[in-house]
């Protein structure tokens, strides 16, 4: 399990909710629920947080 430093966690934000993130094992979890009513989760691969929007959380205000 890769530990993310406290300094990095202090600046990282959830790309969906804008909330801070906390580490639970090999995942980062938002401190605010996402649009589906549960916290957003993001993987950590080789010590690097992967902060890509979950597939079901696409923005609804897309321009055509």
Image (cartoon, rainbow, N blue to C red):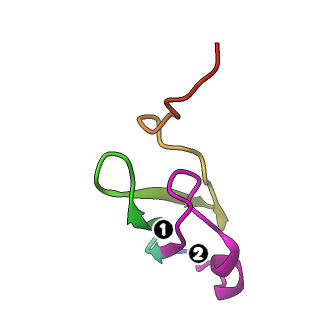
Which residue is rendered at x = 40% and y = 66% of the image?
32
Query: Would residue 43 be counted in the magenta stretch?
Result: no
In the rendered image, the residue lying farthest to the bottom is: 6
- Left or right of 14: which side holds 29? left
Residue located beneath label 1 in the image: 26
Residue 37, placed above or below residue 5:
above
Element type where label 1 sits in the image: loop
Q: Position of residue 29 (x, y in %)?
A: 44, 66
Tell me which label, 2 or 1, sits earlier in the chain: 2
Q: Position of residue 55 (x, y in %)?
A: 46, 35
The residues tagged by marks 2 and 1 sit, at their Cα atoms, a distance apart of: 7 Å
Query: Would residue 21 be counted in the magenta stretch?
Result: yes
Element type where label 2 sits in the image: loop
- Left or right of 44: which side holds 34? left
Using the image as rendered, state which of residue 46 and residue 58 is in the foreground.
Answer: 58
Rendering quarter of residue 50? bottom right
Residue 55, placed above or below residue 37:
above
Q: How many neighbours does mark 1 have within 10 angstroms: few (below 14), some (14-19), or many (20 or more)? A: some
The label on residue 40 is none
**Magenta region:** 2-22
Q: Position of residue 10 (x, y in %)?
A: 65, 81
Q: How many neighbours does mark 2 have within 10 angstroms: few (below 14), some (14-19), or many (20 or more)? A: some
Which residue is rendered at x = 50% and y = 56% of the image?
17
In contact (CB < 8 Å): disc 2 and disc 1 = yes
Residue located beneath label 2 in the image: 2
Quadrant in which the C terminus is drawn: top right
């Amino acid at each position: 399990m890769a530990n993310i430093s406290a300094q990095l966690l202090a600046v990282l934000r959830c790309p969906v909710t804008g909330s801070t993130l906390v580490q639970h094992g090999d995942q980062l979890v938002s401190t605010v629920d996402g649009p589906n009513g549960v916290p957003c989760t993001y993987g950590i691969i080789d010590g690097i947080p992967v902060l890509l929007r979950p597939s079901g959380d696409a923005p609804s205000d897309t321009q055509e």
